[in-house]
Amino acid sequence: MFIECSTQLTISDLNEVETKLGFNLPEQLKKHYLQYNGGVPVKSCYYAQDIDLETEIATFSSIKYKKSSSLLEENYLDFINRGVLPEKYLPFGNDWGGNLFCMDLENGSVVLIWMDLGEVTERCIIYQTAL
């Protein structure tokens, strides 16, 4: 469950965003965004037992309709155009420190990317789980 979501999305909205991005969004991400367009998860803490990491998700980016957080599609294109992230990582949320929760477009896994370690390399990427 999420609060402070943006305008409800339609399939047509997602199709427009996919055209803008130049690829199809993963199905599980589309299902989530059709239900909740960005916002703040009610249960915001996440614990990854296998790596003993607890973090808090501050917000999910919205798609197409900006509310308080940034737009997913704008973030992705900005990060890619500036060479900050590899194209396979689609940022959809962040923690309170500005680190990014991203979907790996190649395998559907969710990763947390530490943005304060300099250039994004494998040492900055913590694999979480599937969305």
Image (cartoon, rainbow, N blue to C red):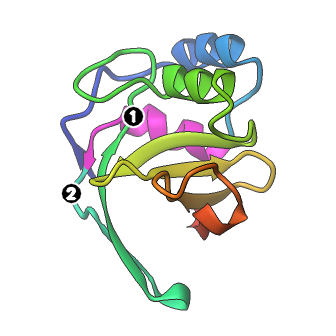
Query: In the depicted view, which residue is nearer to us: 92 or 15?
Result: 92
Assign a secondary structure to mark 2.
loop
Query: In the depicted view, which residue is nearer to us: 71 or 130?
Result: 71
Query: In the depicted view, which residue is nearer to us: 67 or 80?
Result: 80
**Image location of residue 56, percent across then percent down:** 29, 64
- Inspect the magenta stretch and tell me whether residue 37 lies in it: yes
Assign a secondary structure to mark 1.
loop
How many numbered tags mark residues here?
A: 2
**Image location of residue 108, percent across then percent down:** 71, 54
Q: Nearer the viewer, mark 1 or mark 2?
A: 1
Q: Residue furthest front?
A: 118
Q: Residue placed at 43% from the left, 21% from the top?
A: 9
Direction from residue 34 to residue 67 in the image, left or right: left
What's the mark number on residue 42? 2
Q: Residue placed at 59% from the left, 69% from the top?
A: 126
Q: Main secondary structure of the magenta part?
A: helix
Tell me which segment is drawn in magenta.
27-40
- Inspect the magenta stretch and tell me whether residue 1 lies in it: no
**Image location of residue 51, percent across then percent down:** 53, 86
Q: Residue placed at 42% from the left, 23% from the top?
A: 71
> What's under tag 2, amino acid-wise?
Val
The answer to which of marks 1 and 2 sits earlier in the sequence is 2
Query: In the depicted view, which residue is nearer to us: 91 or 125?
Result: 125
- Residue under label 1, please give it: 61
Task: Place residue 4 in its image quadrant.
Answer: top left
Direction from residue 67 to residue 11 in the image, left or right: right
Q: CA distance from mark 1 to mark 2?
A: 15 Å
